Amino acid sequence: MIRKSIVTLLLIVPPMNTALAAVDSATLIAACKEYVAIYDRRGEKRFLAGIATSTAEAMRAGLCRGMMEEHAGHSHFGGQQLCSERWYEQASFIANQNPSDFVGSSERLLDAACND
């Protein structure tokens, strides 16, 4: 009975639309500013960053890193990765951009950071 109810519920509830979870460029820029503030050029946490960083700041920094990693994972052409894993450099590039230059989707911003 419970199994049948779960199956029925899964069929009734529509699948989550990933477009609703899209992050705009202004949010990505703010998140990457947090990432740069927490990490140094070698990609290691700055001294006392764990103590001086709030949960919200850490979450924003994680959003930046996660989006860069996900983008790099999908940036392949002919079996070759197009986007390097220089996270600090990419985050610095993104953090220094003007949100009005990348209105809407953050995809163009991530592409620009890969090609910088």
Image (cartoon, helix red, strand yellow):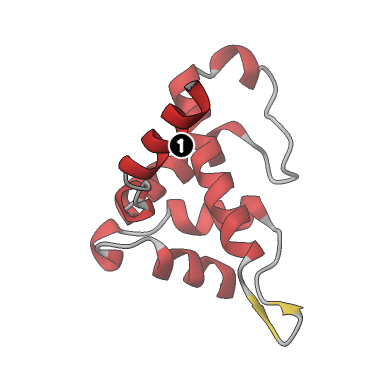
Identity of the residue drawn at 48% across and 45% down: 32
Identity of the residue drawn at 46% across and 56% down: 94
The image shows residue 28 at horizontal and vertical percentages of 40, 49
Element marked by disc 1: helix
Furthest residue toward front: 1
The image shows residue 7 at horizontal and vertical percentages of 46, 37
Residue 82 shown left or right of residue 5 in the figure = right
Quadrant occupied by the C terminus:
bottom right
* Depicted 15 relative to depicted 50: above or below: below
Residue 32 shown left or right of residue 78 in the figure = left
* Depicted 15 relative to depicted 77: above or below: above
Furthest residue toward bottom: 78
Residue 69 shown left or right of residue 57 in the figure = right
Residue type indicated by callout 1: Val
Residue 22 shown left or right of residue 46 in the figure = left
Identity of the residue drawn at 69% across and 58% down: 86
Question: Quick one: label 1, few (<14), some, or many (20+) residues within 10 Å?
Answer: few
Q: 40 or 30, which lies in front? A: 30
* Depicted 94 relative to depicted 58: above or below: below
**Tally of numbered tags:** 1
The image shows residue 39 at horizontal and vertical percentages of 64, 36
Q: 91 or 5, which lies in front? A: 5
User: Toward which corner of the image does residue 79 lie, by quadrant?
Assistant: bottom right
Q: 50 or 41, which lies in front? A: 50
Q: Which residue is mark 1?
A: 7
The image shows residue 41 at horizontal and vertical percentages of 69, 46
